[in-house]
Amino acid sequence: MDIKALVSQMTLEEKAGLCSGDDFWHTKAVERLGIPRTMVSDGPHGLRKQDDKADHLGINDSIKAVCFPAACATAASFDPDLIRRMGEAIGDSCQHEQVSVVLGPAVNIKRSPLCGRNFEYFSEDPYLAGRMATAMIQGVQSRNVGTSIKHFALNSQEHRRMSSSSEADERTIREIYFPAFEMAVKEADPWTVMCSYNRINGVYASEDPWLLTDVLRKEWGFRGYVMSDWGAVSDRVAGVAAGLDLEMPSSGGVNDRKIVEAVKAGKLDENLVDQACERILKIVYRYLEKAKPDTPWDQEAQHALAADIAAECMVLLKNEDDLLPLNKEDEIAFIGEFAQKPRYQGGGSSHINSFRTTGALEAAKDLNITFARGYSVAKDEATDAEIAEAVAAAKKAKAAVVFAGLPDSYESEGYDRTHLRMPDCQNRLIEAVAEANPNTVVVLHNGAPVEMPWIGKVKAVLEAYLGGQAVGEAAVRVLFGDANPCGRLPETFPLKLEDNPSYLFYGGEGNVTEYREGVFVGYRYYDKKKMEVLFPFGYGLSYTTFEYSNLKLSADKIKDTETLTVTLTVKNTGSRAGKTVVQLYVGDRESTPIRPVRELKGFAKIALVPGESKEVSFTLDKRSFAYWNGQIHDWHVETGVFDIEAGDSSRNLPLKAEVTVESTAELPRRYTLNSILMDIMADPKAAPLMREFMRKTRETFGHSEKEGESDAAKEAITDEMNTAMMNYMPLRGAFSFGGTSPEEAEELLKKLNQ
Ligand code: BGC
């Protein structure tokens, strides 16, 4: 299809019309030219296709579909291949249902555990989020269905989500909030990007030319179209100029008319409207030309896949005395309404109308299980009778498994949490059960970290997150050892909310939210502050054990233009087949910018049978060592020693090595009279010039001692102190003490800045 030719035949009104939705879920048709409408649908962990009664808050029913684990869970798999398969399955369902673009993945950073939508997002770590998003996009798009990576950008809270301005500095944006988008755009070529509701440093994402054009297209090479989040448009004309191609949903024609008027008034270049239309139509036809509505959608098979995926996502947080796996012959008490009706997805636009749900109770129907409901989710209460029944069941069983977590109302799109507590009734129930039976296990269904006041009283905790419609099957497999848990936390579980780095500023004041913790999000903060946490980033147990050894680097010194290969060996030293997640962290030992102790720069999920070893290798490049330098507005590596650490969580890194990385890029020198000696002396090019200058000055003026200085004072001032005090002396001071003329000073500055 010659898209340019097609657009050239369109009237201005038709073009302006194409730049917004026909209704809630469709792009517009231009019948005169044979352009059909195409459908888009949520996303991200299944298909939410609404036929009529459309809404963007998941209120009205959509067609029956398969609900896969939400991103909070899939991220915990640390397994891009797995999420790629999930993407393929969702792509198939879209083809079957004639949906051209699925609205996801959602990659916003979990700045605070309070964000109501954290269950839909991957991680507090941008590298992990980027890898998972990339794989998901590749999976969906392999079926010739588009994705819409969202919500671009800095959309890490629901509070005032359509008006709040996320205020962050350049480095924070580049190092924390952009990389997941950047990696996905560069490596997976998403067909579309969805801009967020919020403003960024005062400018609505939907009308930010820096965001949507300079960074997204010019720097990262994005080729698809940008659509707005549903209702994110404030000034449509500014949006077109900024690079927002498609407004969703329909504006009822209001904004289409504004575009026409602006073009006619000479306020908006018509070429920009053409360009938006070309981008939209390119994707419309990319889908249409290979649409395969006869693609089968085998929901049963996808349910089975959802169970397999969920099992790979569960994180075993505690397993004292190897209580898990449970014995299938033993009588086990399943307690809690979630055993019957698990909470397996979150509320809002991602809500899938599951064709079937399997709770753990049903999945374990052939085992020796007694059940007590324990609490009522709807009433948010546990009556004395319910607790007594649970205690009785626990008492006579070999072990008790309490299925607990957060009810729907506790976390959802549209608003944030205000605390990390689970319902009181559930906490009380867990305590009572744990008292009745020392072998108590807690299975958690939640989209984000919770406080666990009972953690010392139960023997095992299995974090199931929001594991999709087959979560019950997966939980039973893991509980009884048919699957070996292999998920790792994609986020830190803090001891308490107040420990979180964004705690003081999260939510903001009025419509302004300052990201004052900067790059110190999640473990970047907890590690720097050496804080205790409930469970660290990357953590998770297994029913087997692994040994990490033999860390080797391909070089002990590289230039920042070269790559470094890191290899290590991992061995299954236990008696069960299992998987571990090898994690590789890099830290700049000394740096001018204040940097995290370590940052995740590689990971690999490795399957091993007992006794088996595998060599794992990673390639690190400039980006693995770099920070964002605001002076050059680019990535920069500072020459120096970097720590390379590997292990199975951010707090268990038994393998360590170091590499020296040499920068090949020189930062521009901008010394002035106010530059201090310390900075100049730290600069390998400037230091010799400065030293030479100081030597000459001393020769000219001689070394004069301060008049009246006592011997004791002279002795007390050591050379080290002298140097330390001189460190902060600005050049102007050195010049005036040294009697340097303005011409000489000028001359030296010129040399220093060369
Ligand atoms: C959400 C998006 C979603 C859209 C369409 C919005 O409220 O923020 O994530 O894709 O609705 O349902």
Image (cartoon, helix red, strand yellow):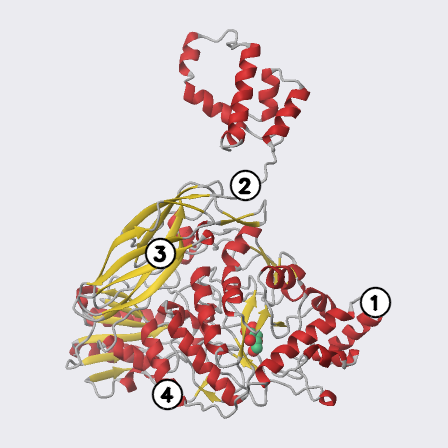
At x 41%, y 74%, the residue is 83
**Is 419 placed left or right of 373 in the picture?**
right
* Quadrant of residue 148 within the rendered picture: bottom right
Q: How far is the residue under mark 4 from the one under mark 3?
A: 35 Å
Determine which residue is flagged by label 2: 666
Q: In the image, residue 480 lies at what x, y percent?
A: 22, 77
Mark earlier in primary sequence (1, 3): 1
Determine which residue is flagged by label 1: 266
Q: In the image, residue 498 lies at what x, y percent?
A: 43, 55
- Residue 584's tag is 3
Q: How far is the residue under mark 2 from the one under mark 4?
A: 56 Å
Q: Amino acid at mark 2?
A: Glu
Mark toward the viewer: 2 or 3: 2
Mark earlier in primary sequence (2, 1): 1
Mark earlier in primary sequence (2, 4): 4
Determine which residue is flagged by label 4: 301
Q: Amino acid at mark 3?
A: Leu
**For the residues bearing labels 1 and 4, Cβ distance under 8 angstroms:** no
Q: Amino acid at mark 4?
A: Ala
Mark earlier in primary sequence (2, 3): 3
**Callout 1 crowding tier (Cα within 10 Å): few <14, some 14–19, many ≥20:** few
Q: Is mark 3 within 8 Å of ligand 1?
A: no
**The residue tagged with tag 4: helix, strand or loop?**
helix
**The residue tagged with tag 1: helix, strand or loop?**
loop
**Callout 3 crowding tier (Cα within 10 Å): few <14, some 14–19, many ≥20:** many
Q: Amino acid at mark 1?
A: Gly
